[in-house]
Image: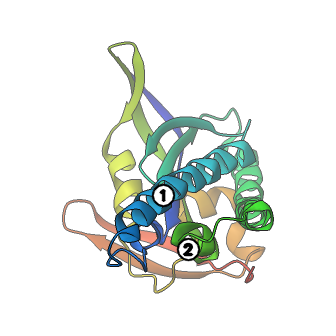
Amino acid sequence: MQEVQGFIVLLDISGYTRYIRSHNLRHVPGIGKRFREMSEAHGEKVVSDLLETLINATSPLLRPEKLEGDAVLLTAIAEDDQAFAVKLIDCLQGVFEAFHKRIEELMFVQTCMCDCCSHMRALKIKAIAHHGPYLLKTVAGFREIAGQEVIRAHRLLKNEVDSNEYLMLTDAVVSLAGASDTLRMTSHEESDPDLGLTTVWVHFPDDH
């Protein structure tokens, strides 16, 4: 087990649960069940494709650690944290464009009219970036990351931001990058009963 200082990033596809469950014909006798099953299968394929898009959009800057349902956890250990933080924020801004570009590509070639295929544009992306210490460990041959700051990053997904698409940076990342001077951002504090207050900066990307 090794403790390191690094960047922790979560990319979460928002609207996923509603998207997968939006089956308008689920109650139609006969075709309802088949249509629902087809729609669910297509929905899973779309989300898998989009997760792969997110991983590709952040490679090779970030290392994917784990897929977590409709989200991906990524990390990076940098030689120069300040320089890396600037590159990271630029990269994460590009994630939104890559994500929505891929949705438009899928919509363009998609002829299926099931609910999931018809409502891909309802999917959005939330990006959270944090910097701090975490543990690297190996369990049954698999690399795992753990520690309080990993928990903090995950709990920031449950926040007070009234939007389903944004870039959220903790004060630790902003302090390294000076991002508040170059991005339109607002700051506030997120409260957690176990971890206390975390100052975050939120940027809302342009509408796609």
Looking at the image, is 4 positioned above or below residue 50? above
Taking 185 as reference, is 106 left or right? right
Name which residue lies at 47% across and 72% down.
Answer: 15
Q: Which residue is tagged 1?
A: 38
Task: Give the residue type at disc 1.
Answer: Met
Q: Which residue is tagged 2?
A: 201
**Which residue is outermost to the bottom?**
162
Task: Give the residue type at disc 2.
Answer: Trp
Expressed as whole percent of the image width and height from the top left, the position of residue 94 reads 77, 60
Q: CA distance from mark 1 to mark 2?
A: 40 Å
Question: In the depicted view, which residue is nearer to us: 198 or 51?
Answer: 51
Expressed as whole percent of the image width and height from the top left, the position of residue 189 reads 40, 77
Is any part of residue 168 visible from this angle? no
Marker disc for residue 22? none
Q: Quadrant of residue 18?
A: bottom left
Q: Quadrant of residue 113?
A: bottom right
Q: Earlier in the sequence, mark 1 or mark 2?
A: 1
| Rendered-image quadrant of the C terminus | bottom right
| Rendered-image quadrant of the N terminus | top left
Question: In the depicted view, which residue is nearer to us: 60 or 149?
Answer: 60
Looking at the image, is 142 positioned above or below residue 148? above
Expressed as whole percent of the image width and height from the top left, the position of residue 21 reads 38, 70
SS at badge 1: helix
Q: Residues within 10 Å of mark 2 (few under 14, many from 20)?
A: many
